[in-house]
Image (cartoon, coloured by chain):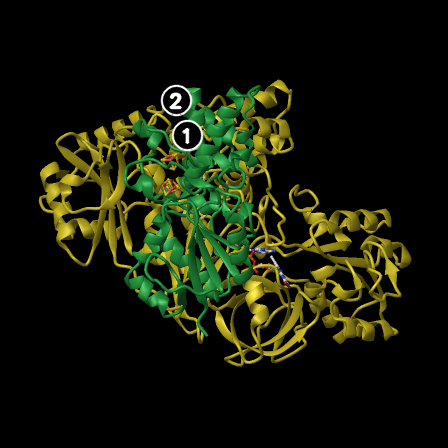
Amino acid sequence: MKILSKEDFSDFVNALIKDDSLDVIGVKSKGNKFAFGPLEEASELRLDYDVTLLPPKKYFFPQRETLFTYNIADGSSAKNAEAKPSVIIGVHPYDIVALFHMDEIFKETKSDPHYFEKRNSTIIIGVNIQKMSKWNFSPYMGCATVDYGYDLMLTDLGNRYAISVGSQKGGELLSKYAKNITGALARDIQLVGQKKREIVNMSQQKFDFPIEMIPELLKETYEESGFWEEHAEKCLACGSCVLVCPTCYCFDVKDNPDLALENVERVRTWDGCLLEDFAKIASGENFRPTRPTRYRHRYFKKGKYLFDRFGFISCVGCGRCSSNCLPNIANPVDLFNDMYHETRSMGVQLAPAQTPEVNIQSEGNIDYVPKLATIVKKVVMTANETLFEIKMDDGSELGHKPGQFAEISVFGIGEAPISISSPPTKKGTFEICVRKVGNVTNKLHTLNVGDRVGVRGPFGNGFDVDSLKGKDLLFVAGGLGIAPLRSLFNYVLDNRKDYGHVVLLYGCKEPRELLFSEEMQAVSRRPDVEFKSTVNWCPDNEAWGGNIGVITTLIPQVSFDPNKIHAIVCGPPVMYKYVIADLKARKVPDDHIIVSLERRMKCGVGKCGHCQINQIYVCKDGPVFNYAKIKGIPEAL
Amino acid sequence: MKPKVAFFDFAGCEGDQLQVANLEEELLTLLGQVEVVSFREVMKEHSDDYDIAFIEGSCTRLQDEDRLKQIRKNAKIVVAIGSCATIGGINALKNYKNLDEVRKTVYGENAKLFDTYAARPIDAVIPVDAYVYGCPIDRTEFLQVVKSLLLGKKPDIPNYPVCVECKKNENICAFERGQFCVGPVTRAGCNSCCVNEGTVCWGCRGLVDNPNENSHKEVLIKYGLTVDDAIGKFKLYFGWQEAKR
Ligand SMILES: Cc1cc2nc3c(=O)[nH]c(=O)nc-3n(C[C@H](O)[C@H](O)[C@H](O)COP(=O)(O)OP(=O)(O)OC[C@H]3O[C@@H](n4cnc5c(N)ncnc54)[C@H](O)[C@@H]3O)c2cc1C
Ligand code: SF4
Ligand code: SF4
Ligand code: SF4
Ligand code: SF4
Ligand code: SF4
Ligand code: FES
């Protein structure tokens, strides 16, 4: 531990400010509040602050950030300028722990380069809490003091600062820019220890139970809709509680063209699960349509989902959510205390707290920049659906598995997740079948052969073609659900001898909406495939000789051995419940039912939070799921 | 071929067209993309051959409806700009007055009252394809909308409240400054500009799709407004929308 007098500390900060190669940021006053901002003078620093309006995450994951810029005409892109090294002075321990949480999240599976570029070029100078906001409960979360995650950590000792050096970078910064550094005496070390013990007793909030119980408590309360309705009744869906949170990471991605309509910035901005349209998709379906469901999601996210995934409760107790919620319903302490008392009064016995097994892998970086590709064939299939055949410009294969998807960019408009509809056995190009429903898909329909698109991916897990080998397969496709299933179906046909009996059931609203009609006719003539199709209704002016009724009316028409068959189901959200019920009635075991799900998506790589169903990410853990694994996940089907 | 655009005004202050006229440099770049055929604020000529019609002001007289319907016929895309055109705006305040008078004269012989035509937004008369909210409109957002239309895209107008932008801008909340704000129920998109300037949101962009009005009135009262004043806060801009809800 080092000691620096307050004057010498000021000189140190001013020396940092003078160095033009550094951005120096610190806590300053803003009205009667505090905020991190660029420092012009050491005297602006307010290390005696209670809490800042926004956490320092805004320097690593800014409110608005350009991921890259591209040209509308040819799709060519330019990367951002490199981040300038910076020093952030005055970060409280809970915000340091929060950054550690963010690191884990932005690192999982693949690293987010935009976040880590800034993170790695920033030096964090922490400061131990001198005043604690009345909403702060960081001591309960074990985040009021911290022994890691900083380069330097300051403790105010009256006329001097005690400085713990947390990293080599921190030590070097100190010796390069500070003068008159002395070693800490035993007395100083003791004093710092005493201060830290005092901080732990500063909170004015109070949990009535040990916080280790939070994940189990939540588990017991999920279904208590009355509890959530009562607590969320006053929710304004204003998002304040998540926008100010140091551990929230959800984002939206949008394209912003310049005035000349030549170049476009792809921008990511903060988003939040409390906002009404967060989980809404183009067809109008909203997977978390009500205030209580969104309100509940936030608490589960913090206290259960991320806990199960990472092993920590994703709240550091800064109290920002509590102080920013106008109806005063966002305070985690109040909510969890209520939850505790309610479960107790119901006589629920809580299982002891368990630490989940954490297995976080990370390999390589996310590339947000799409690769260029060209439309080589366009087949209009119905009034709303068109099949596009696409070739990567660099001649590479997309390299997908059946059931995976890609993020397709339409230049000037944006990106949308689309299933690959062709099997990997088709080489040189791939196909997508697109329904026009919104901006990206409408514009894509106006593109022609020779036009360029952008492609990121393939993403998602896809179907496990090997484990299906030798099995009987029952494909159940509703409407556009045929698009992802076709990649597996055609793969099976291309490797027909590896699979047993194959049945395809396909249904849509009316005859003119039938997709791939020629292919279907060819399939219907194959002796080695059983094919049945249906329409919900047939208007008088259309011809239809087949079955009329919803897709489930086809299931009784086929015979299969429930123990040998594996059902593969994809269709509109409403379809799954009914199909699965009918399959179960036919004694198909749960783990023989495989579904492919759709959710709103932005990043495709498990970062933006949009596709989340309870604890799972559809983009990363799915879109293909074994029913046995997700039947216990309440928001899945 | 460049799309032809025309501007029209109804009952309003023309403040929004002024915002457009004031775009200066941006307008020049923008003009490279479109051809303005009618714009009273800056030119004398007028033509009925246009693709995009920007309409300012609310509809306050039955006679205005025909003119609106004609514009709808001529234009491929109709864009309502400003509070008056998008949500009825301040004009809709008079609707409350009439209601009060109606109440006073419940048993009166005054049939004339029923001729009064409540001020209404454009989409109460003709279908509208895009909206530029605000009183006056935000120039950046106006440009966003025009760019989107030119690219064949539905403009991205947020359906979340002003608080979202206000938090991102790291403002001190009006309620913490002893002031009263309707940002929590008002549609964002202005980048919380009034709060950024140290004042409050008055709600000029209208309500979000599903505002929690009761909860927010409770908040206003909890922080010290009288019930009447809280209701008054909602009347200023939300008159037409509240009556419809
Ligand atoms: C794994 C997966 C596979 C899909 N496969 C296909 C396919 O093969 N063919 C097809 O036509 N459609 C498919 N969809 C749906 C398709 O992604 C949406 O229709 C599309 O995103 C709508 O974008 P838009 O810009 O046209 O509409 P807008 O309404 O303008 O959407 C704006 C944004 O909202 C998000 N969004 C809206 N709807 C959806 C949605 N349904 N799913 C995910 N994000 C959404 C997107 O980020 C989109 O950019 C798939 C979706 C998922 C998640
Ligand atoms: S801050 Fe409060 S009112 Fe706003 S979304 Fe969060 S819980 Fe709802
Ligand atoms: S949930 Fe609230 S208290 Fe916890 S870290 Fe987020 S803002 Fe702070
Ligand atoms: S989903 Fe989680 S990280 Fe995203 S906004 Fe909600 S609480 Fe925050
Ligand atoms: S000042 Fe208004 S808009 Fe901003 S956070 Fe407060 S209530 Fe919301
Ligand atoms: S802050 Fe409120 S009053 Fe001001 S422009 Fe935005 S919506 Fe209108
Ligand atoms: S987390 Fe972004 S799409 Fe799944």
Q: Are marks 1 and 2 on the same chain?
A: yes
Find residue A116 and report its horizontal and vertical position in percent: 37, 56
Looking at the rendered structure, the kind of residue marked 1 is Lys
Chain coloured green? B
Q: Indicate the secondary structure of the residue bearing disc 2.
A: loop
Q: Residue at x 20, y 55 (%)?
A: A22
Vertical placement of residue B68 versus B46, above or below: above
**Residue A224, picture quadrant:** top right
Residue A378 seen in the current view? yes
Q: Is residue A185 above or below residue A198?
A: below
Establish whether ligand 6 lies closer than 8 Å to the Cβ of label 1. Answer: no
Name the colour assigned to chain A in the rendering. Answer: yellow
In front: A351, or A487?
A: A487
Q: Which mark is residue A6?
A: none
Circle 2 crowding by C-alpha within 10 Å: few under 14, some 14–19, many from 20: some
- When asked about the image quadrant of residue A634, the answer is top right
Image side of residue A348 versus residue B166, left or right? right
Question: Could you tell me residue A469's position as x and y percent?
Answer: 76, 66
**Residue B225's mark?**
2
Q: Quadrant of the N terminus of chain A?
A: top left
Circles 1 and 2, Cβ within 8 Å, touching? The answer is yes
Chain under disc 2: B
Q: Secondary structure at mark 1?
A: helix
Q: Which residue is mark 1?
A: B233
